[in-house]
Amino acid sequence: MPRIIDVIDFLDQTGTEVAHREPQSGPGDFRLGSQVIVRESQRAVFFRDGKAMDVLGPGRHTLSTGNIPILAGLIGLATSGKTPFQAEVVFVNMQEFIDQKWGTPSAIMYEDPEIGTSFISANGVYSYQVNDPALFINKIVAQQASVTTKKMADYLRNNVIQHFSDLLGELAMQRSSVFYLTGQISELSAATKAKVANGFESLGLRVGDFYVRTVTPDERTRQSMDANRDVRALGRGMTPQAAVLYNQIQAGQAMKAAAENPSGMAGIGTGIAGGMAMGNIMQQSMQQPQVLGQQPPAQQPPAQSSGGSINLDQVKQAIDNLDLRFSMGEIDQPTYNRLIQKWQDKLKELGG
């Protein structure tokens, strides 16, 4: 004769079980008068023939047609409920599961409007809890005996990464720069959370805290960002001829690096193209007024040496401009050190 289950409950001492089925092997033998004990942090979903009959809140529940009226139509009452019936209970942990980590397994391609094709990685943490026990069981638990946070981790992580990637695609369409991604972490966290929340809701979950901790460009992207910062730091302080010289220096450095590292030849085009793009930005910035509504004073273009190349006087002028901008606090020490070295190298090359 099958064993009659008179009391059914579940205590998770690990704190990692999101859902737990009793009996774990499948439906067990219940009868009217059996009790289900649900703790404060739990909800229990009562199943009969694979169908959710009711969601039980905290407390002691006696299985009766009064407590669960739908049982009246499922159990032969001719025997006063003494005949056992097959049923099962899934306990759902309603606590908030914190410190859940996520991160991109590889760099994500991002089309930046200023520096071109870029690659970035990101990571962060979030928390979640079950919001709709019945929906969560139907979507995630199904026929499993238990579901732990470890089982949930990969599934939810992939969900987060997918929504984060979708957000990057939207930002790229809006022509947002990588500088925005690395400098506006709070805004990026809020935008990602909004997307993740919709996906989690469809699973019967609610997102709690959600944070993007870091957005990290790969090495090539970082170098392009540094070069872009250099150009913006120099801004209007350089003449168009100095911008051209900057192009030449950047392209020359890319050629030198590729020659020293044959395996890096594939990146030489990026280096040269990046230098040309930086020069364009510099020239555009020099066409803007220094003060809103006020045009900068006209400057006589410095004389060029034969063949149109940059001469010694022009390099000295570029160094003077850099010194001036640094003294006025318009560029920081690391940027000044990096740029002054390039100009001084060029000065030595020209015999200055």
Image: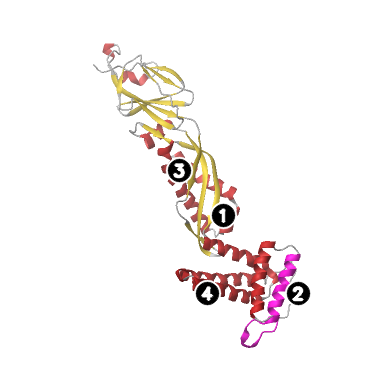
Residue 16 x, y percent position in the rendering: 45, 32
Q: Residue 287 at what x, y percent from top left?
A: 67, 72
Q: Nearer the viewer, mark 1 or mark 2?
A: 1
User: Which of disc 4 and disc 2 is earlier in sequence?
Assistant: 4
State the CA–CA distance, disc 4 to disc 1.
30 Å
Residue 297's disc is 2
The amino acid type, in three-letter code, at marker 4 is: Met
Q: 261 or 270: nearer the eye?
A: 261
Residue on which the image places disc 3: 199
Q: CA distance from mark 2 to mark 3?
A: 57 Å
- Using the rendered view, name the quadrant where residue 348 is placed: bottom right
44 up-or-down from 32: above or below: below
Q: Residue 248: where, in percent of width, then height? A: 59, 76
From which residue to which does the magenta span run? 301-327
Name the residue beneath numbered marker 4.
255
The secondary structure type at the circle numbered 3 is: helix
Q: Is residue 326 magenta?
A: yes
- Which of the marked residues, 4 or 1, is nearer the chain's N terminus? 1
**Residue 81 placement (x, y as % from top left):** 30, 13
Q: Residue at x 34, y 31 (%)?
A: 145
Q: Main secondary structure of the magenta part?
A: helix
Nearer to us of marks 2 and 4 is 4
The nearer-to-camera label among 4 and 3 is: 4
Callout 1 environment at 10 Å: few (<14), some (14 to 19), or many (20+)? many
Sequence order check, earlier mark of 2 and 3: 3
Q: Residue 181 bears which disc, if any?
A: 1
Q: Amino acid at mark 3?
A: Gly
Front one among 289 and 237: 237
The mark nearer the N terminus, 4 or 3, is: 3
